[in-house]
Image: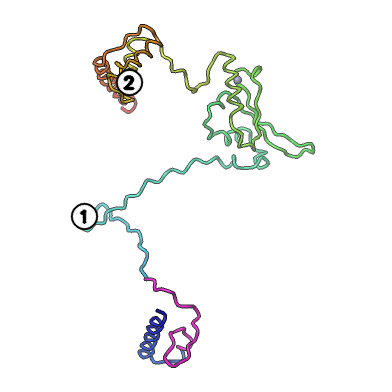
Amino acid sequence: MRGRSKGSKRGKGASKAAATPPSEDLALQPVAPVLGVPSQAPKTPPPAYVTPQVPFPRPVTPPNASHKGGDAIAPIIVSPIKPRARRAPAIARMSDSEVWDMADEEIIAASFSNTRSLTYAHYNISIERVYATGGAKEKIVFIFTCKTDPDNHAAQKRARGNTAAGTGNLVATEGACLKRHGLSRPGATQSQSLPYSEALHHVLIALRCAASTRPFDMILDKWYQAEVEMLRPGTKLPHPVTVSRDLKRLYAGMSTTISNFFIVRFC
Ligand SMILES: [Zn+2]
């Protein structure tokens, strides 16, 4: 292997030497050694293997729409560019001392403009600038004051720099505050209990069959019937044929409602 490669190199060098007469310039170039001449060490070692010099393929610009030629290049289909994730405003990433002299509203807006928690709506947010004993700027603290019952719902505080702090305390004290007033959190999962009516029961059964892909005759399952009897004794269950009919009526009725919705929204 080694001998063969050496031989081929030598032969190549010989043919090169024959094609171009030796000159003084050649002595300066790292060419392959000529037969009989002591070899000079090349400045850089030859590569271990030959790498083909194929140019890297470049992106092709698709022809414009007016080009009707048969050899038109199909345009490259690329994924749509995804919008960059929303980042907190620059002010929110600044240190307390950097934003110290800014308006309170500006600092608050920067910190809470991207928040998704609904609990902040329960509070008025204000700012307190805390100074150290020597008068140096120590930290900025957010104060969350209950909008509805600040006397009984103690204000919550959170250092501006404590970005890792979640909304746990805010949510918990808000929940307690709302409970005192017999309210529930806006946006919180409301109780799904519905008042019983035969019609609504039929709707739920039909929706269960359609949305949860249950057979209409699941209504005949004795264990299901036992469960219904346990929860509401004496409840009459519809026949599977009735369930099927209800579903068709629901589909027709909901189609009209949905089409009306789109007519109102977009026409
Ligand atoms: Zn409150």
Placement of 238 over or under 259, stated as above or below: above
Image side of residue 178 versus residue 254, left or right: right
The residue positioned 77% from the left and 38% from the top of the image is 135
Farthest residue in the front direction? 222
Residue 151 is marked as none
- Provide the residue designation for mark 2: 207
Q: Secondary structure at mark 2?
A: helix
* Range of magenta residues: 26-52
- Provide the residue designation for mark 1: 68
Q: In which image quadrant can residue 102 be found?
A: top right
Earlier-in-chain disc, 1 versus 2: 1
Q: Residues within 10 Å of mark 1 (few under 14, many from 20)?
A: few
| Residue 71: percent from left, percent from top | 22, 58
Quadrant of the displayed image that contains ligand 1:
top right
Image side of residue 91 versus residue 227, left or right: right
138 is within the stretch colored magenta? no
Q: Main secondary structure of the magenta part?
A: loop
Q: Residues within 10 Å of mark 2 (few under 14, many from 20)?
A: some
The residue positioned 37% from the left and 12% from the top of the image is 228
Farthest residue in the top direction? 234
Q: Amino acid at mark 2?
A: Leu
